[in-house]
Image (cartoon, rainbow, N blue to C red):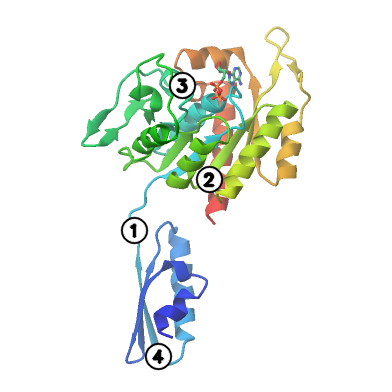
């Protein structure tokens, strides 16, 4: 067996690009893309240790390469429509941008592309050749299914057509972005499946409301992501109770703690809860994502975004 074949069988096998042995000197080329500085040196040490343990190896030289890193995709899904998946996606994206990330938003919700409304933009993307150039809104960049069809035009797309349009969004000019939020169509059907297979997200977030039925639907979304080996970064509970606008007292018509318990039972992180709020809905309808302003909703979304980033780090480790 050659030294290359032996190293490929090791724990870092998938990253070995080439390995050669000449006069007792092993030259190993390995792919270090996606590794942070500290991980890179640990990786290099590991390779050196592995290679020097092989017979006839007197000296090891390691060269690390890094393929160009694209943005990390974070899919936001829900088991059913109307739970606030799009609203949460917009505000997470804006909150992540405020935390210093270069964020892109792909609105893949073919059944109700609402990101142009939520981000208050009616600008259409230009194309460079076949590649779409995202539009700017609230500090993030956006491509939406809604930009590809005229307003109010019912989307009766079936499988291949929907997939084609979604591929165009994913293959847009995202080169300067480090995070891409993908607002998935609600549910767990074929469109979601093929989009996830093609775009290979770094992780997924599930949005659910506190009712039992919605949580059962969320479980289906968990199953879908698990089937595709997409790490689940966490569950966000939306419309979780409300603060009375008159007396300020919190009220929980559906009880509290259900989503957190469900997340624990499903073995996924619980990222937090977002109350039902008339102010949030009005600001969203007006194209002013509350995460971009000040107040309780902006604070909640910043916390959710921070937890999401922590979860993303854990998933990548
Ligand atoms: P989905 O993407 O899951 O279909 P949307 O984000 O479009 O859901 O939200 C559905 C409706 O609920 C919208 O009118 C939105 O403004 C409203 N909404 C979402 N979250 C909240 C909330 N926390 N408080 C009040 N209204 C909300």
Residue at image point 59% right, 32% down? 78
Graded by Cα atoms within 10 Å as few (under 14), some (14 to 19) or many (20 or more), the crowding at tag 1 reads few
| Sequence-first disc among 3 and 4 | 4
Residues under labels 2 and 1: Cα distance?
20 Å
Q: What element carries label 4?
A: loop
| Sequence-first disc among 2 and 4 | 4
Single out the mark in the foreground, 1 or 4.
1
Residue 67, percent from left and from top: 34, 58
Residues under labels 3 and 2: Cα distance?
22 Å
Graded by Cα atoms within 10 Å as few (under 14), some (14 to 19) or many (20 or more), the crowding at tag 4 reads some
Residues under labels 1 and 4: Cα distance?
29 Å
| Sequence-first disc among 3 and 2 | 3
Q: Which of 153 and 235 is in front in this view?
A: 153
Q: What element carries label 3?
A: loop
Residue 34, percent from left and from top: 43, 56
- Find ligand 1 in the image and state its quadrant: top right
| Sequence-first disc among 1 and 4 | 4
Residue occupied by mark 1:
67
167 left or right, relative to 186:
left
**Disc sitting over residue 203 in the figure:** 2
Residues under labels 3 and 1: Cα distance?
34 Å
Residue occupied by mark 4:
58
Q: Nearer the viewer, residue 204 or 36?
A: 204
């Amino acid at each position: 067996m050659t030294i290359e074949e032996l190293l490929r069988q090791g724990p870092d096998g998938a990253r070995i690009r080439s390995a050669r042995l000449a006069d007792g000197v092993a030259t190993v080329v390995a792919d270090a893309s996606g590794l942070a500085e500290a991980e890179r040196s640990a990786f290099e040490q590991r390779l050196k240790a592995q290679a020097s343990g092989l017979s006839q190896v007197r000296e090891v030289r390691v060269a690390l390469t890094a393929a160009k890193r694209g943005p990390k995709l974070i899919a936001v899904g829900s088991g059913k429509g109307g739970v606030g998946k799009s609203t949460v996606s917009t505000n997470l994206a804006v909150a992540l941008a405020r935390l210093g990330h270069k964020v892109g938003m792909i609105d893949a919700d073919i059944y109700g592309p609402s990101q142009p409304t939520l981000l208050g933009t009616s600008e259409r993307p230009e194309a460079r050749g076949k590649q779409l150039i995202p539009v700017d809104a609230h500090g993030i960049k956006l491509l939406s299914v809604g930009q590809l069809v005229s307003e109010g035009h019912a989307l009766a797309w079936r499988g291949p057509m929907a997939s084609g349009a979604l591929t165009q969004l994913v293959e847009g000019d995202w080169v300067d972005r480090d995070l891409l939020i993908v607002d998935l169509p609600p549910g767990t059907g074929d469109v979601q499946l093929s989009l996830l297979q093609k775009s290979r997200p770094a992780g997924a977030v599930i949005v659910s409301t506190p009712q039992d039925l919605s949580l059962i639907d969320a479980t289906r979304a968990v199953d879908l992501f698990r089937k595709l080996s997409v790490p689940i970064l966490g569950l966000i509970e939306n419309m979780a109770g409300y603060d009375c606008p008159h007396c300020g007292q919190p009220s929980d018509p559906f009880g509290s703690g259900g989503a957190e318990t469900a997340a624990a039972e499903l073995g996924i992180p619980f990222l937090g809860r977002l109350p039902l709020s008339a102010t949030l809905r009005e600001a969203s309808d007006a194209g002013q994502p509350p995460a971009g302003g000040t107040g309780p909703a902006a604070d909640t979304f910043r916390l959710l975004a921070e937890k999401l980033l922590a979860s993303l780090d854990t998933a990548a480790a």
